[in-house]
Structure formats: structure tokens, C-alpha cells
Image: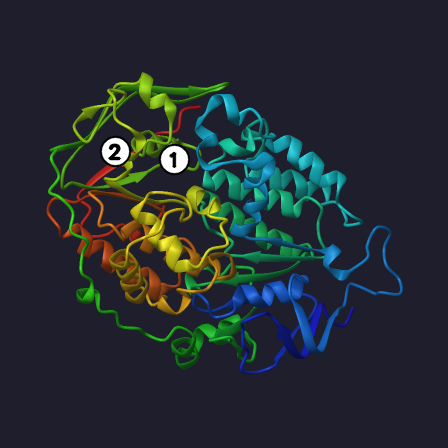
């Protein structure tokens, strides 16, 4: 084929979104492109146009691998030969059998979910005319993504990193003609990131056509050969990766320095904490069928301490945090004290949650309400996934103040489901911080954020931590992202 993809003077048809210019973009055989730009710049929108998820109202969009007059059996549209792998792909899994956030931690309910092996088998059966991955590549994929380690796990029981590995395997197993990958390394520990990066290189060497989308230069896969810079929904001329990295002027245009004023924020006034001990776990054992997560685990945090929490994908970090956040019923049978009170002595989950601000990738998946972003932020006052009560005018004002601080106040009336993944993450960070909680739990809060927004969020976390009586638990695989305020560290060792 002479080209893989050709967009000529394409005018997108996306409701409520204006593009300053028509789009011209061509991918030739042997090229691997990375769409690069800040959060909300239009990267995912371009992937949606390429995949057929969004339509066009003018111009030409052609695929070199698809001939409408000579289609393979089972193929009706070019989109049938394209797969998109992104964080949002997990929404379809969250919808399976009406899954809910706490279901993962309820043993009676999580048995309703399918296993990784069952879903992969279903994917193979529905491959719709796509090729199957070469046997040697398939073996390499299964080994590098350690799929056999999770093959019998219920999908609801996967950690965010394990879920990402599954989505990668599920997307690749049928060897689509074109693979679109949005934020390829979200949720993976450093070892798994390297394995996936190496596997993308192997795929490229074997002719797999791929287009990536990344919010920062540090996440560009090694196999990428070309960069398509994006700025404010304007798609700049494509350029070879090495030439882009050597062009400081272009790089500063794509990622323009931004200054933030965190001193404009007025913290919510809460009553002074009436406890000295935030939580204490004593000889905690947690297991699920066929697997032990914790054995004789001990951890104590006092008011005002700032901790980091680390561990490999699947080591149990999310389960540990669920014991602290009142989402896991196993806490009732364990020796756990929360906010100076023994768990299971008459307190409600809301008594616990009113002290906590919490964000995680798993929780992000379950925000599927078609509500304005300002309502999602305001739901943080009530600790609900979505807003089902009417906030006061003062609460709405504070929600908008937080959105302004993070530079997303223009999204206030937009549907949460219609903004980019990075913008959604910023909305949820506002939700987490809005009530100035006694305990702030941030589980990989910088996922999917561009460098400027990462810096902004870290500054806000540092300001929060400057309040002596506030307690922080910061979870990340990347040590360089740990805020300077963190002075204590806890690492979970993966058992078996």
C-alpha cells in the first residue's frame, strides 16, 4: 500500500467543539506516529476521528488497508479493522453485569464477573475478520504482559495495572490492521512499562501499524518514528521524532510554560480533628480464593504524617486502601482502627468517609454519570460517585474555585463524559480536594496529565501538606513524582 492513513482537509463533526483549521495528516507504511500535546488539546479527538467513533463533515479520510469494493469476510467498515486501546476502554468492563465500585471487595458479588481467560476467549471469537497475532508474537505478548499470572482472575479483581495489561492483550490478540493507543503506559509499574515499550518495538519491527497519543514527551514510545504536535485543537505539521526533540522552539510551543497561583485558594473550614491516630492495622491477613494478599500486615499512621505507598502491580495497594476508605467489608473482621476508633463499633461508612479525600484509577472508571463537571467536583462534599444531592451556593462556589485553580473552570458546564481523560482526572482531583479532608489519599493522581498539570497538582499537594494536621498517603510507581513533603514510606511486597 502507498499509505496507511490519509486525512485531507478533514473538517470534524464533533458537537460543541470548534477546530480552527481543517486536518491534514498522512501515515505511510513503516512509520509509527505519536500524537503529542497537552491535556484537552485534541489528541483523543483525532484518534476518535481515525477510528470512526466521530464523524467528519468535509474533506477526505482514507485507509490504505481498506478497499470498500474488496472487503474481507465479516468486515463492513474500515473501523472493523482498527482497535483503540485507552483508559476509557475499561468502561465496557465496568458496565459488565452492572458492576459497581465496591463489588471488587465483596466476595459474594465479585464471583459474578468473568475471568480474564473467558474475556480473551470471547475476544478471539469476535475478531471480525482481523488476523490473529503471529504465534511467536502471541507467546511473547503473553510472557511480557504476564497474562498467565492473571488468566484465572475475575476481571473485577484486577488492579489498575493488571487491568491495563489485560486491555493491551485483548487489543492485540486479534492483530488489528491499525492499533490506536491512547496514553500507553498508564497504570504500569516501571518493569512492566519497559516490557510493554519493548513489545511495541517488536510489533513495529513485525509490521504492526500503530498510532500513539501521549500527554508528555517522557511517555513517547521508543518505536515512534514521527510526531504530530497538537496545540489547542490545531494539528501542526508532522515531523520526525529526532527532529522534533531537537527543535526547542517547537517543543516550547506545544508545551508552553504556565504559571499557577495556588495562593488564591481558600481552604474549606472544617472542625479540628478530634483524633491523633489516623489508622492502625495490626497483624492483618487478607486473602481471596487462590490468593493471599497480606499476611500479618502492620501499619500505623498518626495525624499530620505524610506517607508514600508503593508496590508492584497486583501487590494489593488498592485492597489496602479499600480497608482504610470503608469500601471493603473485610475490615469488620480485622484488627483495624480508623480515626481513633475500632472498626465495626457502630460507626457508619459516612462517618469514615467524611474525613477522607480519595482518588484512584479504579474509582475513575466508575464515574459514568452524564453530569456537568462542576457537579462531579461538588459530589466530593458528599463522598458519592456522582451528585445526588443539591449543594449549597457556597459549596458550588468552592467547587468552581477549585476548577479555576486547576485551569479547568471552562469545563464547569460540560458533561464529564465528553471531556478528555486528562481533563477528567483534573476534575476528580478537584473533587478529592474540595472539602480539604483530614486524610488525603492520592493513588497515581498524575496519570494521563501533561507536564504542566503534573507540576500544578504537585504544588497543590505541597500546599495541602503544609497544614500541620493534615495526613497524606501518596501512591505512585514513579519515585520522581513523590512530593517533597513525604517523609515516610511503606512498600507492599507481593506474595506469590
Quadrant of res 412: bottom left
Question: Mark 2 and 1 residues: CB-CB less than 8 Å, in contact?
Answer: no
The one nearer the camera, 125 or 98, is: 98
484 lies left or right of 255? left
Quadrant of res 375: bottom left
58 lies left or right of 197? right
The one nearer the camera, 190 or 356, is: 356
The circle drawn on residue 175 is none
Q: Residue at image x 61%, y 81%?
A: 22
Residue 238 percent coordinates (x, y): 56, 76
Quadrant of res 228: bottom right
Residue holding disc 2:
351
Q: Residue at image x 86%, y 59%?
A: 71
Q: Is residue 365 above or below residue 201?
A: above
Q: Is residue 241 above or below residue 167?
A: below
Looking at the image, tell me whether mark 2 or mark 1 is earlier in sequence order. Answer: 1
The one nearer the camera, 211 or 204, is: 211
Task: Report how many numbered discs are placed on residues in the image.
Answer: 2
Residue 320 percent coordinates (x, y): 34, 31
* Colour option used: rainbow
Q: Quadrant of the C terminus?
A: top left
Q: Quadrant of the N terminus?
A: bottom right
Distance (Cα) linking label 2 and label 1: 21 Å
Residue 204 percent coordinates (x, y): 63, 57
Q: Is residue 31 above or below residue 57?
A: above
Q: Which circle, 2 or 1, is nearer the viewer? A: 2
**Dot 1: element:** helix
Residue 113 percent coordinates (x, y): 58, 30
**Dot 2: element:** helix
379 lies left or right of 46? left
Residue holding disc 1:
318
Amino acid at each position: 500500500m502507498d499509505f496507511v492513513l490519509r486525512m485531507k482537509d478533514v473538517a470534524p463533526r464533533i458537537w460543541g467543539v470548534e477546530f480552527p483549521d481543517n486536518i491534514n495528516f498522512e501515515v505511510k507504511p513503516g512509520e509509527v506516529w505519536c500524537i503529542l500535546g497537552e491535556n484537552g488539546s485534541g489528541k483523543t479527538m483525532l484518534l476518535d476521528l481515525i477510528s470512526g467513533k466521530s464523524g467528519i463533515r468535509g474533506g477526505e479520510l482514507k485507509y490504505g488497508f481498506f478497499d470498500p469494493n474488496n472487503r474481507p469476510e465479516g468486515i463492513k467498515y474500515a473501523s472493523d479493522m482498527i482497535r483503540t486501546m485507552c483508559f476509557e476502554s475499561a468502561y465496557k468492563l465496568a458496565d459488565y453485569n452492572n458492576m459497581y465500585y465496591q463489588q471488587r471487595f465483596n466476595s459474594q458479588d465479585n464471583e459474578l464477573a468473568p475471568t480474564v481467560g473467558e474475556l480473551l476467549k470471547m475476544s478471539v471469537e469476535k475478531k471480525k475478520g482481523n488476523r490473529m497475532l503471529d504465534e511467536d508474537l502471541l507467546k511473547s505478548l503473553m510472557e511480557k504482559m504476564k497474562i498467565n499470572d492473571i488468566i484465572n482472575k475475575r476481571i473485577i479483581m484486577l488492579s489498575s495495572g493488571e487491568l491495563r495489561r489485560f486491555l493491551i492483550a485483548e487489543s492485540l490478540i486479534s492483530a488489528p490492521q491499525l492499533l490506536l493507543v491512547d496514553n500507553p503506559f498508564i497504570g504500569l509499574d516501571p518493569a512492566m512499562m519497559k516490557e510493554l515499550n519493548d513489545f511495541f518495538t517488536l510489533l513495529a519491527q513485525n509490521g504492526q501499524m500503530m498510532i500513539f497519543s501521549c500527554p508528555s514527551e517522557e511517555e513517547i514510545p521508543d518505536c515512534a518514528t514521527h510526531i504530530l504536535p497538537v496545540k489547542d485543537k490545531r494539528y501542526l505539521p508532522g515531523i520526525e521524532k529526532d527532529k522534533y526533540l531537537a527543535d526547542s522552539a517547537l517543543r516550547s510551543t506545544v508545551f508552553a510554560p504556565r504559571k499557577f497561583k495556588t495562593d488564591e485558594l481558600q481552604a474549606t473550614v472544617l472542625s479540628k480533628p478530634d483524633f491523633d491516630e489516623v489508622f492502625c492495622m495490626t497483624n492483618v491477613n487478607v486473602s481471596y480464593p487462590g490468593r493471599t494478599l497480606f499476611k500479618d500486615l502492620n501499619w500505623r499512621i498518626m495525624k499530620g504524617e505524610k506517607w508514600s505507598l508503593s508496590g508492584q502491580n497486583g501487590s494489593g495497594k488498592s485492597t489496602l486502601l479499600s480497608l482504610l476508605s470503608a469500601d471493603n467489608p473485610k475490615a469488620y473482621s480485622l484488627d483495624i482502627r480508623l480515626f481513633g476508633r475500632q472498626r465495626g463499633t457502630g460507626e457508619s461508612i459516612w462517618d469514615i468517609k467524611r474525613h477522607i479525600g480519595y482518588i484512584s484509577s479504579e474509582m475513575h472508571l466508575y464515574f459514568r454519570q452524564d453530569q456537568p463537571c462542576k457537579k462531579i467536583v461538588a459530589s466530593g462534599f458528599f463522598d458519592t460517585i456522582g451528585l445526588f444531592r443539591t449543594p449549597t451556593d457556597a459549596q458550588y462556589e468552592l467547587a468552581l474555585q477549585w476548577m479555576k485553580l486547576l485551569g479547568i473552570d471552562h469545563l464547569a458546564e460540560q458533561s464529564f463524559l465528553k471531556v478528555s481523560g486528562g481533563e477528567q482526572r483534573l476534575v476528580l482531583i478537584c473533587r478529592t480536594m474540595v472539602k480539604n479532608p483530614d486524610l488525603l489519599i492520592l493513588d497515581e493522581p498524575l496519570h494521563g496529565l501533561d507536564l504542566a498539570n503534573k507540576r500544578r497538582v504537585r504544588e497543590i499537594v505541597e500546599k495541602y501538606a503544609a497544614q500541620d494536621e493534615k495526613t497524606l498517603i501518596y501512591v505512585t510507581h514513579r519515585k520522581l513524582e513523590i512530593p517533597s513533603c513525604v517523609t515516610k514510606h511503606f512498600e507492599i511486597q507481593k506474595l506469590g
